[in-house]
Amino acid sequence: MINPTHFWSIALFVPLLLFGYLLGSIPSGYLAGKWIKGIDLRNYGSGTVSGSMVWEHVTRWAVVPVGLFDIFKGVLPAWLGLRLGLGEVAAMLVGLAAIIGHNWPVYLNFHGGRGFSPFLGVLLVLFPWGVAITLAGLAIGNPLRSPAIPLFVVMGLPIVSPYLNGSPTVLWLAAGMTVITIVKRLEANRRPLPTDPVERRKVILRRIFLDRDIQDHKSWIQREPHQHN
C-alpha cells in the first residue's frame, strides 16, 4: 500500500524540481544586456551570460540587480523545499536544479552562466556560513585571475561544514556544484575545441583551471562579437 505522506512528498517535489530549473533559467544577465545596451551578451567576452560579463560589457551598476536576482533564483526553490516539509535533501536537489537552469537555460538554447550566484542562494538557505566562505574564495580568486580558487573553496566546504554546524547535505551540495562547474567549463556553451590534439589538451586544461580558452585573461573577457567563432 502506498504511503499517502510519501506520495504527497513526491507530488510536491517533482513540480518544485521543474520550477527550480525554470526559475534558474531566467537569464537576468542576458536581459540586462538587451534592455540596457541592446546587445546579446552571448557574443561578448567569455560568452557566458553572467554578472562578470554584465560588469565588463553592459554597465557596472546592473551587476547589483542581476546578482541579487540570480542569488534569489537559488534561495526561493531551496526555501520552498524546506517550507513545504520536503527536507534538506529535497531542498538541496531543487537548488541544484536552479543552478543547472542558470547554466543551461531553456530560454536561451541552453547557453548560460557559471552558476555561482544561485549556488550562493542555495547556501544561504542550507549553510549560511558557506556564503561567507565562498565569497572569500571569489574575493581571493578574482584579483589573482584564478577561477580555480573558488572551485577549490567549494570542494572544501564539506571539510569545514561540521565545525560550523553544517548539515551533511552540504557534502552533496558541494559535490553537485563541483561536477556542474567542471562540466560547464568543459562544455563552454558548446564552444568548439581546436582540432590540433596538443592545442586541444591545452584548451581543456585552461577551461578546467582558468575557465577560458586562452592564457590572457584581459583579452578573453574583452572579446567583441567579431572575435567569436
Image: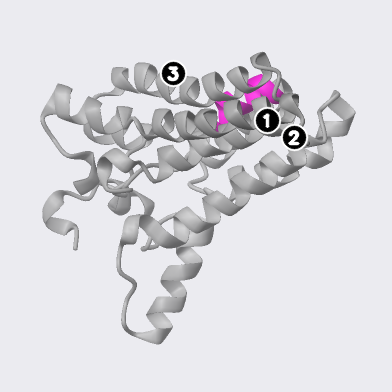
**Is residue 192 visible in the rendered structure shown here?**
yes
Identified by mark 2, the residue type is Ile
Crowd rating for badge 3 (residues with CA inside 10 Å; few <14, some 14–19, many 20+) = some
Query: Against 151, is 81 above or below?
Result: above
Is disc 1 placed on a helix, strand or loop? helix
Asked if residue 120 lies in the magenta stretch, the reply is: yes
The residue that label 3 is drawn on is 68
Identified by mark 3, the residue type is Leu
Q: Earlier in the sequence, mark 3 or mark 2?
A: 2
- Residue at point 49% right, 23% down? 71
Question: With 150 as the anchor, is 31 left or right in this view?
Answer: left
Residue 7: assigned label:
1
Q: Nearer the viewer, residue 184 or 76?
A: 76
Instruction: For marks 1 and 2, give the CA distance.
Output: 7 Å
Magenta stretch in the rendered image: 119-126
- Residue at point 63% right, 30% down? 136
Query: Against 194, is 120 above or below?
Result: above
The spot of residue 105 in percent (x, y) is: 35, 41
Instruction: For marks 3 and 2, give the CA distance.
Output: 41 Å
Instruction: For marks 3 and 1, give the CA distance.
Output: 35 Å
Q: Quadrant of the N terminus?
A: top right
The spot of residue 50 in percent (x, y) is: 36, 36
